Amino acid sequence: MRSDRAPKATKYWAALVFLVLGTAVGTWHNRRVNSGKPDYLAGMFRGVVSMPAHVLGSVSNWFGHKTEWITRGRSLASENQALRQQVAELQGENNTLRESRIDLDRLRGDLGYVTHSEHKMIAADVIALRPDPKFDTMIISRGSGDGLKNTSVVVTRSGLVGRVFEVEPGTAAVLMLTDQKSGVGARIQRPESRAVGLCEGDNSHTLSMIDLNQGADVKVGDAVVTSGLGGIFPAGILIGSVCEVSQDPASGGRTIRVQPHVGFDSLEQVYVIP
């Protein structure tokens, strides 16, 4: 019987010893504190425990930072998606503001041109540029309901664009200067020349100036304007500048090319002289 009870008794000795020691140390600590004396045992205990606790805290913080993406993965993904959406919206707003600024600058420039023009002008947007790639034509957002008719002249502040050749109530088709079926009476603007000819398109970026007198005074850089002859285009509208004057050895004639001042590939808005 003693051999069976002895192990059970020894189990409680350790607990009893720790209990007694703890009570004694606690009583001693309280007396030292109440009497205003330092507790050296508590200080030693703190000194021994503080270093491992500090190390364990540092390791825990480092490990937490390194593994935070695991626990916050979904949250970060949601935040990133929201930020990307916000960036996309801001980029859209920025592009809208940039386009508005471009339109405003263009309208400010056109205002002086329209105000000082001797002709009545109707603003129109370009809604289709070269709908058939075989022809240099475009569709504009004005038509017979706005007073347009066949032969109405189309311009920008840079110069002559062409003429209307087909009109509907709300739209009109425009034959541009560069089309192979286009032709306009032209004049060299330089006072010493004033030579008269005809500017024709050939579906390229330049025009041919033909029907000039054999001895006509034409130089590279000369400004070319509408002559007013023919009854369709008013006189004095800028067409472009002479970019080439060459002699044909076979025929003895001259080849004169004119660079239009209008950028036909980037037209967005034009003005129509009804």
Image: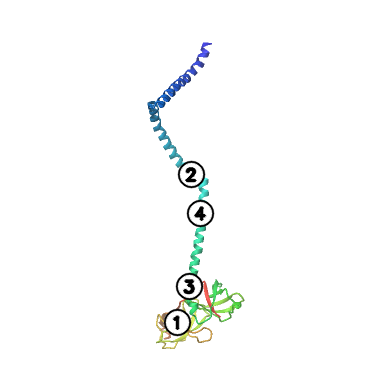
Is 39 drawn above or below residue 119 in the view shown? above
Q: Earlier in the sequence, mark 3 or mark 4?
A: 4
Q: Earlier in the sequence, mark 2 or mark 4?
A: 2
- Disc 2 versus disc 3: nearer the observer: 3
Which amino acid type is marked by label 1?
Val
Residue 175 image position (x, y, % from top left): 54, 78
Q: Earlier in the sequence, mark 1 or mark 3?
A: 3
Residue 260 image position (x, y, % from top left): 46, 77
Which amino acid type is marked by label 2?
Trp
State the mark number for residue 69: 2
Helix, strand or loop status at disc 2: helix
| Residues tagged 4 and 1 counted as in contact (Cβ below 8 A) | no
Q: Earlier in the sequence, mark 4 or mark 1?
A: 4
State the mark number for residue 224: 1
Q: In the figure, residue 151 lies in which quadrant?
A: bottom right
Is 36 drawn above or below residue 263 in the view shown? above
Residue 6 image position (x, y, % from top left): 50, 14
- Disc 4 versus disc 1: nearer the observer: 4
Mark 2 vs mark 4, CA separation in Å:
19 Å
State the mark number for residue 113: none
State the mark number for residue 108: 3
Task: Check disc 1: other Cα within 10 Å, few if <14, some if 14-19, many if 20+.
Answer: many
Residue visible at 45% across and 82% down? 224
Q: Which residue is mark 4?
A: 84
Helix, strand or loop status at disc 4: helix
Mark 3 vs mark 4, CA separation in Å:
36 Å
Q: Earlier in the sequence, mark 1 or mark 2?
A: 2
Residue visible at 42% across and 33% down? 53
Is 145 drawn above or below residue 37 in the view shown? below
